[in-house]
């Protein structure tokens, strides 16, 4: 298997570390400072799943997609493409650029390579669908915490549930199974699921209710549940998201905002 990590931030380096550890061929697209650190000192992973170091000779790192070699004969690929998987690990505001740049290099994916979006929020899939067919685009739900204390170091801080891989378009899930196995083998449990859309909306409910207020008040999430005013705001956000889901025909694992709110306070905070 050969994978391209598009976005060498904390999530990208965390997933890259799993694939490298499992013995897969990995290239990383990152900013110049990160590439310099990776080429000099390799990739280091610390945290709850153990500590590992991978020398610069164990993977490739590039500051631009244009710098990635195009010679397929030297890449030992298992399909008619440079990569079996392109894992997009950028922020959502980088989706337009990522999709456009990848569309200019069709040999990257060939006919059978797949794109997997390791991104928060909703709408990234549609951006990529403007450039690629639906059966090439998959999504990942990640609720593992990654931090990057140094440019070439990723720390796994918390793990709430397995990484979930799936399709928002009902595509064949079999292409995701080797990727899930490789990431799991590399240390972070990963599974293929039938309805990843419900998982993405569940994460959005959690993030939208907590992230803004946590940042504004600089307090742990648990504190927000103790204040009546923050509870009022969070519950209003949750209700609005359910209204959006209903209006757009989407669903998550809870039928009503009240049902989710009960679980939110009892189990998630």
Image: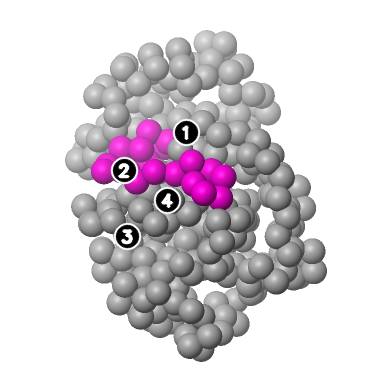
> Of residues 93 and 50, which is closer to you in this image?
50
Residue position for label 3 = 175
Q: Tell me if I can see residue 142 in this picture.
A: no
Q: Could you tell me if the residues under marks 4 and 2 are in contact, i.e. CB atoms within 8 Å?
A: no
Question: Residues in magenta?
Answer: 184-204
- Say which residue appears at 35% left-offset and 80% top-offset: 80
Kindly report the distance in space between the C-alpha atoms of the residues bearing marks 4 and 3: 9 Å
Tell me where residue 26 sits by quadrant. bottom right
Q: Nearer the viewer, residue 5 or 126?
A: 5
Q: Which mark is residue 180?
A: 4
Between 125 and 146, which is closer to the camera in this rendering? 146
First in sequence, mark 4 or 1: give its number: 1
How packed mark 2 is, by other alpha carbons closer than 10 Å (few <14, some 14-19, many 20 or more), is some
Q: What is the secondary structure assignment of the residue under circle 3?
A: helix
Nearer to us of marks 4 and 1 is 4
Instruction: Give the Cα distance between marks 2 and 1.
Output: 13 Å
Which residue is identified by label 1?
Answer: 161
Residue 67 position in % (x across, y down) = 60, 82
Outermost residue to the right: 40
Question: Above or below — where is 242 with respect to 132?
Answer: above
Q: Secondary structure at mark 2?
A: loop
């Amino acid at each position: 298997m050969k994978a391209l990590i598009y976005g060498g931030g904390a999530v990208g380096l965390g997933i890259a570390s799993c694939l490298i550890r499992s013995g897969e061929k990995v290239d990383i697209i990152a900013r110049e400072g990160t590439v310099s650190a990776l080429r000099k000192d390799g990739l280091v992973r610390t945290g709850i799943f153990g500590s590992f170091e991978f020398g610069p000779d164990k993977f490739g790192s590039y500051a631009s997609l244009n710098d990635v070699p195009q010679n397929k004969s030297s890449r030992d690929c298992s399909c008619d493409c440079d990569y079996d998987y392109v894992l997009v690990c950028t922020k959502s505001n980088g989706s337009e650029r990522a999709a456009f740049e990848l569309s200019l290099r069709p040999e990257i994916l060939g006919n059978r390579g797949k794109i997997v979006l390791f991104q928060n929020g909703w709408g990234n899939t549609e951006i990529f669908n403007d450039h690629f067919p639906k059966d090439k685009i998959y999504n990942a739900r990640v609720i593992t915490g990654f931090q990057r204390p140094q440019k070439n170091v990723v720390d796994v801080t918390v793990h709430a549930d397995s990484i979930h891989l799936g399709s928002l378009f009902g595509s064949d899930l079999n292409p995701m199974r080797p990727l899930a196995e490789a990431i799991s083998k590399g240390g972070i449990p990963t599974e293929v699921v039938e309805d990843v859309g419900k998982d993405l909306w569940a994460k959005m409910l959690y993030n939208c209710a907590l992230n803004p207020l946590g940042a504004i008040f600089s307090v742990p999430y648990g504190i927000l549940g103790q204040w009546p005013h923050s509870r009022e705001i969070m519950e209003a956000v949750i209700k609005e998201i359910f209204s959006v889901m209903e209006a757009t025909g989407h669903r998550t694992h809870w039928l009503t905002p009240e049902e989710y709110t009960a679980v939110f306070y009892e189990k998630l905070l």
